[in-house]
Amino acid sequence: MLKSRENFNQRLGMKVYLYSTCLGQATLGASAVSAAKLLTRCGAQVVYKKDQTCCGQPAFNTGYFDEAKEVALYNISLFGDGDEPILVAAGSCAGMMGHDYIELFKGSEHEEKARNFASRCKEVSSFLNEHLELADKGEPVKLSWHSNCHALRIAKSVEASKSLLRKLSNVELIELEREEEGCGFGGTFSIKEAEISNAMALAKIADIKKTGVKYLISGDGGCLLNINGTLRRNNEDIKCIHLYDFLLARLEGQSIDDKGVSDERK
């Protein structure tokens, strides 16, 4: 790890692209900014493409494959043919861009281009776990972690995210008993199957409450918004915080009580 970090620091200013995701642009802009600040702390030159758009996952998951292909080709063109890493600020989108794009174009004239693009995509936390120096300036705290389904099974970035939390000297990570079960969000699933979605979210909250923690961390904005909304509707006193906001707060010595996803962002 040390050798890898030294090699990276020798290339100070290495260009990386930040893909902020739809939620990062629409409702969780502060979390995208936190990701950019963390990447800068790694010595990276962070480039943000202002014309970036959806990764295409909602269309892909609901069977609109032609529309998903159109979005995918747009993103592939937008980020060009270079070899710079494309760091994705959510496991679900990282799974789509780094895995499902290949499936989408398998056997077509665009397959090679999709494969090359996918090889550049990784979730932000995977990069941070390799390069970020973590000096915890926060007060001792106990918390738990929610694993986004795509991050767990497709992007496979969950262990990197949890590793970052474990490296913080004043943080105690308490595992959920049913960590690998979804929260009920699933994009359009939460709309099409609202009752089932709500039942899944309540089951997730019951699992969180067993730990006795007051803070839940996750790297996926959709899951956080879904869990947080269910918590608020049921008057539960547990705060949901995005991983990037939490890490930056710990490094800068800021209070994490100001970082909940439902708080007004400034």
Image (cartoon, rainbow, N blue to C red):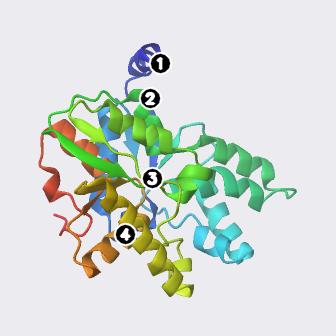
The circle on residue 231 is: none
Cα separation between marks 4 and 1:
36 Å
Which residue is disc 1 drawn over? Answer: 4
113 shown above or below 231: above
Which of label 2 and label 3 is nearer to you?
3
Cα separation between marks 2 and 4:
29 Å
The circle on residue 177 is: 3
Q: Are marks 2 and 3 in contact (CB under 8 Å)?
A: no
- Whichever of callouts 2 and 3 sits on the residue coming sooner in the sequence is 2
- The image shows residue 48 at horizontal and vertical percentages of 41, 51
The circle on residue 227 is: 4
- The image shows residue 105 at horizontal and vertical percentages of 78, 59
Q: Identity of the amino acid at label 1?
A: Ser
For mark 3, does the 10 Å Cα neighbourhood hold few (<14), some (14 to 19), or many (20 or more) residues?
Answer: few
Q: Identity of the amino acid at label 2?
A: Glu
Say which residue appears at 44% left-offset and 44% top-offset. Answer: 124
